[in-house]
Structure formats: structure tokens, C-alpha cells
Image (cartoon, rainbow, N blue to C red):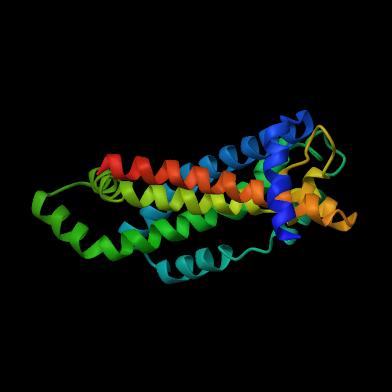
Amino acid sequence: MLWQSIVRAFELMGENDPLLNEIIATTMKMAFTSSALALLIGVPFGILIGISKFPGKKIVITVLHACMALPSVVVGLTLYILFSGTGAIYSVRLMVVAQVVLIAPVTAGMAESYVTALSPWLTETAKGLRLKKPKVLFLAVNESKYQFIVIYLMAFARSISEVGAVQIVGGNILHETRVMTTAIALNYNMGQFRYAVALGIILLLIALGVNTVATIIQHKLK
């Protein structure tokens, strides 16, 4: 069955099927948008926490780390209740919002952990050069630029593989909000296992392609 599914996956890619192309396009739009927004929101917040000293910092970090494990179905259900009856429900836009809520704490937590490890060196450098807070933040960003690619890959992987929240707020509507993961779940529930596995293989190939490109960029930046 697995070999047949692999063959079917490559057949699907070779057929240039409009429906499959549409599902892949919706998936990429959601994944790239949500992971980029999560990176832009979470990383500066995580760096700021990592380089700062303030009362209750340990509590903030504990809460942040707890938010990194937010259940996707809870986030999806909460957003569904908040936006039910509005034009935002069952849209790619709300799917992106759900993804950002889930992923931003992950990017923030990863950035905070990395910058905290750099904190002793950053503190000494800032004292030696008499840098003010904005310049310390810039220094932390500069020293973490390679790590940003790793963080983004984590964010993208979380986004492209998510099913719970996007199923709830997106509704898996054909030609509108159907993405690879919800299409896989749908075909599995319908008993179309070979097609579901084939879609999963295509999803893995997409993720592998993005990771390969990011790795090449990371090496060229060094």
C-alpha cells in the first residue's frame, strides 16, 4: 500500500490537477503568512524578555513556555466562539489568526531561550561599549540572525502540519479553506487511504523543499 501511495503521489503531481494545485496554494498561503507573522511578533518579544531584567521575569517566562503547548483545538474553538456569526469565520484569514496564536509563543520561547544563553556575553559587551537598550536589542538580533532561520523552520513546520484549529475555524470548505492536512483527514475518514497517504507524501515533499531552501540560505549567510 505504501509503495502504491508513493506512486500515486507522483502521479498526482504529474497530472497538474487543478483541485490539488488549489489545495496546495491555499496551504502555502496559510503556512507562509502565519509563520512569517508569528516570527515577526514572537521573536522581538522573546529577545526583549531575554535581554531584560524586571520583577516577575521568571513568571513571564513560565507563562510563555506554557503557551508554547497551547492545544490547537482549544485555540480553534475559542476563536470560533469569538468570531462565530461574523464574516471572518470559515476563512483563510481566521485560519492564519489561529496559526499565529499557536505559533507566536513558540517563536518567542525559542528566541528567549537562545538570547538568555547569550545574555552574559551581551551584558558584558553592552557594559564595555556603553550601549543603550535599543542598541543592545539590535546586537541581540544581529547575533541571533542564523537562529532565526531555525525558528522560522519550526514555525513553518508547525503551521503546515496543523489540522485541529484550521479544521474548526476554516471548516475544510472546498475551493475556499481546504488545505493539505484537512484534505488528508477528509480522505482518511472517507476510507480513501491511498489518496490520503499520497497527499501526506506530497506534504512531506513540500516541507522538505522549504527546509532545503532555508538551509541553503543559512549557509550562504555565513
Residue 85 sits in quarter:
top right
Query: Is 201 positioned to the left or the right of 32 in the image?
Result: right
Q: Could you tell me which residue is drawn at 68 percent across and 34 percent down?
A: 14
Q: Could you tell me which residue is drawn at 74 percent across and 46 percent down?
A: 8
Residue 53 sits in quarter:
bottom left
Residue 52 shows in the view: no
Residue 220 shows in the view: yes
Q: Residue 219's spot in the image, x, y percent?
A: 30, 45
Q: Residue 17's spot in the image, x, y percent?
A: 76, 31
Query: Is 196 positioned to the left or the right of 150 in the image?
Result: right
Query: Is 140 positioned to the left or the right of 75 in the image?
Result: left
Instruction: Give whichever of 15, 166 is nearer the camera.
Output: 15
Does 57 appear above or below 187? below
Instruction: Give whichever of 217, 149 is nearer the camera.
Output: 217
Q: Residue 200's spot in the image, x, y percent?
A: 69, 52
Q: Could you tell me which residue is drawn at 42 percent across and 55 percent down?
A: 46
Report the quarter where the C terminus lies. top left
